[in-house]
């Protein structure tokens, strides 16, 4: 187990990072067409082909999902992935034609200090192609891919991932680009809100604060919400699920954002969670098994959020937001037992 979403057989992830522009793309590639769904709760979403993931829609499976920086410009990342997959013979068959199904979501990172003067050709189509080419079972976390330009109200955001194997044998995983209006910390920090769900000191092992700080009840807001945000994620499992069950998985997984970020689902977030079910292991008892898988998806997503923040590094620009380690490395003796 890698503690990554790629612990689910049939899932690979690739990143493409542009440090000059301060942005990037992450592609979640399905080795075979995979049942998918989505749940969108933020007030300012930027998405592509999410209507096609309605359980009543005709096409039930996807070939890949893109997570991208760049706000609406980043939606073009899916075009690059789609073109490359079609060239490889992937896609929904319409006569002799193949149409790859590649939904996507974007986050806002246009004000993070990078050079966004890209003229008439934004970089996201090419970044999508590069991220697809890099797709593998091992991939980096932190300030890479869609997490490159990500920020939060208090510390640098980033790309995170985590996984778990349930007693039923089902594997659940998540990958997330953390770019929230809110904060992943309790109050001024250093303790991460996802601390109750941590496994094997994966994000420092600090645990909960000794007492609940009063300021933890007052929301920290990124730039007084003048800088747009959005946290976007993919959760996956190896269960045999219907499109409707996969939609329920996405809905339950959204709670992982509430377990790890505060506030969440604000008017200026576009929070979006995709769900994938690779169909390798049947449910023995559909209702309780799905409830347990969905519950695991929420805690795995919370852990992935904290791992993304913990792994992030500040961008190489003057005035860039400091990372968790920049702010708290010396104040967290438990990191060096």
Image (spheres, helix red, strand yellow):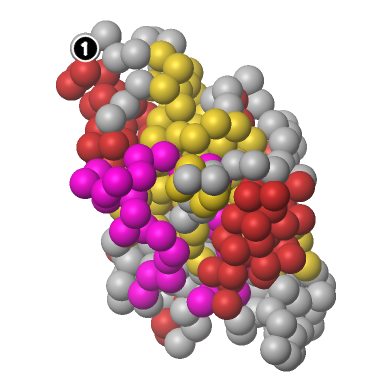
Q: Circle 1 sits on which residue?
A: 285
4 falls in the magenta region: no
Residue 89: x %, y % from top left: 64, 42
Q: Which residues are magenta?
A: 44-72
Q: Would residue 138 be visible to someone looking at this image?
A: yes
Q: Is residue 59 rendered magenta in the image?
A: yes
Res 306 seen here? no
User: Measuring 54% from the left and 50% from the top, which residue is drawn there?
Assistant: 97
Up-down relation of residue 230 to residue 254 (above or below): below
Q: Write down the quadrant of residue 25 in the picture.
A: bottom right
* Image quadrant in which the C terminus is located: top right
Q: Nearer the viewer, residue 121 or 248?
A: 121
Furthest residue in direction front, as rendered = 95
| Left or right, 310 with reference to 56 | right
Residue 175 point in image, percent of width and height: 54, 44
Q: Nearer the viewer, residue 247 or 22?
A: 247
| Residue pictured at 26% horizontal, 18% vertical | 289
Q: Residue lying furthest left in this view?
A: 287
Residue at point 33%, 50% (across, down): 53
Q: Position of residue 153 (x, y in %)?
A: 50, 71
Q: Secondary structure at mark 1?
A: loop
Q: Residue at x 47, y 79 (%)?
A: 228
- Residue 194: x and y, percent? 45, 44
**Number of marks present in the image shown:** 1
As displayed, is residue 327 above or below residue 94?
below
């Amino acid at each position: 187990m890698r503690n990554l979403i790629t612990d689910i057989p049939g899932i690979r992830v690739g990143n493409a990072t542009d440090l000059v522009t301060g942005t990037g793309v992450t592609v979640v590639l399905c080795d075979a067409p995979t049942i998918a769904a989505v749940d969108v709760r933020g007030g300012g979403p930027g998405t592509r082909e999410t209507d096609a993931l309605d359980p009543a829609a005709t096409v039930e499976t996807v070939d890949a999902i893109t997570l991208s920086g760049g706000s609406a410009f980043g939606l073009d990342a899916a075009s690059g992935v789609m073109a490359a997959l079609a060239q490889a013979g992937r896609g929904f068959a319409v006569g002799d034609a193949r149409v790859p199904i590649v939904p996507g979501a974007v986050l806002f990172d246009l004000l993070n200090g990078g050079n966004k003067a890209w003229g008439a050709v934004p970089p996201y189509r090419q970044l999508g192609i590069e991220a697809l080419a890099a797709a593998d079972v091992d991939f980096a976390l932190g300030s890479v891919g869609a997490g490159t330009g990500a920020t939060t109200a208090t510390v640098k955001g980033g790309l995170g991932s985590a996984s778990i194997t349930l007693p039923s044998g089902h594997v659940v995983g998540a990958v997330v680009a953390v770019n929230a209006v809110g904060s992943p910390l309790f109050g001024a920090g250093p303790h991460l809100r996802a601390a109750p769900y941590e496994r094997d000191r994966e994000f420092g092992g600090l645990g909960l604060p000794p007492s609940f700080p009063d300021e933890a009840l007052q929301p920290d807001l990124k730039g007084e919400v003048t800088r747009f945000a959005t946290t976007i994620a993919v959760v996956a499992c190896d269960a045999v699920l219907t499109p409707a069950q996969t939609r329920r998985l996405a809905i339950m997984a959204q709670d992982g954002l509430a377990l790890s970020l505060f506030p969440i689902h604000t008017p200026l977030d576009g929070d979006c969670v995709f769900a994938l079910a690779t169909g390798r292991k049947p449910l023995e008892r559909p209702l309780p098994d799905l409830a347990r898988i969905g519950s695991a998806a929420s805690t795995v997503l919370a852990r992935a959020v904290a791992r993304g923040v913990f792994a992030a590094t500040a961008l190489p620009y003057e005035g860039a937001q400091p990372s968790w380690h920049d702010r708290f490395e010396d104040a967290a003796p438990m990191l060096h037992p």
